[in-house]
């Protein structure tokens, strides 16, 4: 019973794979925040699609509304954090850089 | 049919879990955890566990990332490298691998997912599925089990939320009123955020009340609704400032309401004791509520109990955010 909704869900998850690539590679934190926000937007659609696949849309649409209402709060918190700290690193801090980066933290 | 979707999602979750450990910037780690939470919600939705998925949606999107950001706001984003000597590294590696091995060992004894022959699915679930609607007239079995059959567990979960907020409040609370040196005159002058929040907050709160009240028929209930209501207060605190949100719900009143929520739950369960029934046996409420039989008394009692949970959880989320973001001073925040 693979219908168009199942294919649409799989397509959305494949698109999520690209966003996960952006989360892993993303040079700055801002790239990652945007990628996570887009994953949230895709989740809303995916939950509704799953509701159609399960044929119980009324049970699933509440979760989608909840996401739609609350999705931006975490991004707003991150944005306010960067407004107060005035510092977005252009370099990706990875496990390979074991240098004393802690000393440069200024706030 | 859904198996392909779930496998893909599980792979993504695994990748994100590894990435959140690998990234050395704590802010990025928090953001990756946000994505992790979204995907876990989708996996639970795919399993058909809508109530769990709703909890994950409300907590993951609404409050948990905000709590992490609030902690980083008052501490630092950087990991301070603590150069361990080789023996300590080997010891911790053995400890981690050993614990992981034991967990995997325990995992092998669990019944496979959806196994109809598993003990849980033959005895307990069968009883709930056959008798829950007959005994309580609540179509959403999860709510019936949570708020009626297993009300004792839920009552203590509410107490745990209350103890958590009390613990964080008392740990971080500062008595001195020394003012912070940061300039906050320009901090909250963003017109777009203020106007958008003023527009969004009533809808979020209305939806939260709907989730609390409609838990009998759809996923949701006291906990999810309480988190959504708490998230709306957090949004007000971020869009305006802490002084403004303290006028709406002061810290003293927050603690008082959290206590009242627990008292509503426990008190509602205590009343049947005086009527000669056992603790949390809601059917005794039929004698007090006019025009209700024993079945509808149980149904209405669930709503009352959910309201108690919602009040405690709302105040809990609000109190934890306020304590974390202002470092226990309750004067300035994000």
Image: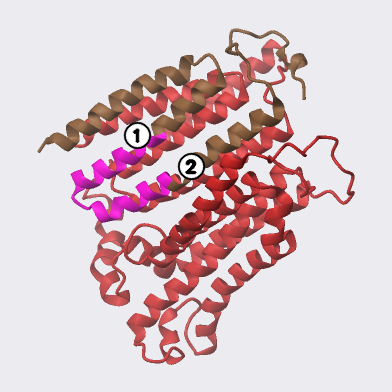
Q: Colour of chain A?
A: brown
Q: Quadrant of residue B45?
A: top left
Percent of width and height locating residue B117: 22, 50
Relative to the observer, which residue lies in front, B241 or B7? B241
Q: Quadrant of the N terminus of chain B?
A: top left
Q: Residue at 63% across / 20% down in the picture? A: A88
- Asked whether the beta carbons under mark 2 and mark 1 sit within 8 Å of each other, the answer is no
Residues drawn in magenta:
A40-68
Q: Colour of chain B?
A: red
The local secondary structure at tag 1 comes to helix
Vertical position of residue B123 compared to residue B85: above or below? below
Drawn side of residue B188 relative to residue A30, left or right = right
- The chain letter for the residue carrying disc 1 is A
- The chain letter for the residue carrying disc 2 is B
Q: Residue at 69% across / 67% down in the picture? A: B256
Circle 2 residue: B61
The local secondary structure at tag 2 comes to helix
- The disc at residue A71 is none
Relative to the observer, which residue lies in front, A95 or A18? A18
Percent of width and height locating residue A69: 44, 47
Relative to the observer, which residue lies in front, A102 or A29? A29
Relative to the observer, which residue lies in front, B18 or A81? A81
């Amino acid at each position: 019973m693979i219908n168009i909704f199942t294919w649409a869900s799989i397509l959305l998850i494949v698109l999520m794979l690209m966003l996960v690539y952006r989360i892993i590679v993303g040079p700055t934190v801002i790239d990652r925040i945007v990628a996570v926000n887009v994953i949230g937007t895709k989740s809303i659609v995916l939950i509704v699609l799953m509701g159609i696949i399960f044929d119980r849309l009324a049970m699933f649409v509440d979760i989608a509304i909840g996401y739609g209402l609350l999705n931006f709060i975490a991004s707003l918190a991150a944005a306010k954090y960067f407004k107060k700290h005035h510092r977005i690193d252009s370099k990706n801090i990875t496990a390979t850089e074991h240098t004393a980066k802690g000393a440069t933290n200024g706030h | 049919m859904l198996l392909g979707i779930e496998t893909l999602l599980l792979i993504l979750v695994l990748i994100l879990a590894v990435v959140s450990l690998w990234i050395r910037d704590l802010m990025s780690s928090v953001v990756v955890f946000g994505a992790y939470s979204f995907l876990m919600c989708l996996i639970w939705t795919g399993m058909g566990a809508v109530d769990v998925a709703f909890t994950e949606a409300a907590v993951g999107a609404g409050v948990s990332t905000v709590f992490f950001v609030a902690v980083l706001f008052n501490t630092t984003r950087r990991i301070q490298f603590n150069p361990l000597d080789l023996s300590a590294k080997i010891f911790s590696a053995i400890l981690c691998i050993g614990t992981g091995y034991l967990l995997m060992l325990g995992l092998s004894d669990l019944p496979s997912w959806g196994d109809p022959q598993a003990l849980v699915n033959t005895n307990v679930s069968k009883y709930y599925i056959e008798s829950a609607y007959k005994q309580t007239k609540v179509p959403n079995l999860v709510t019936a089990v949570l708020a009626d059959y297993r009300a004792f567990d839920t009552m203590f979960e509410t107490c745990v939320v209350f103890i958590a907020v009390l613990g964080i409040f008392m740990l971080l609370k500062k008595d001195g009123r020394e003012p912070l040196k940061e300039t906050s005159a320009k901090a909250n002058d963003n017109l777009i955020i203020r106007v958008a929040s003023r527009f969004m907050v009533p809808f979020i709160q209305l939806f939260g009340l709907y989730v609390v009240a409609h838990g009998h028929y759809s996923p949701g209930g006291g906990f999810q609704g309480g988190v959504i209501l708490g998230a709306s207060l957090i949004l007000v605190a971020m869009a305006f400032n802490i002084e403004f949100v303290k006028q709406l719900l002061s810290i003293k009143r927050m603690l008082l309401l959290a206590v009242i929520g627990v008292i509503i739950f426990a008190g509602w369960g205590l009343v049947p004791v005086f009527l000669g029934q056992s603790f949390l046996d809601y059917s005794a409420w039929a004698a007090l509520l006019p025009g209700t039989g024993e079945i509808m008394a149980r149904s209405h009692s669930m709503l009352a109990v959910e309201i108690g949970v919602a009040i405690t959880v709302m105040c809990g989320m609000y109190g934890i955010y306020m304590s974390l973001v202002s470092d226990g001073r309750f004067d300035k925040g994000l």
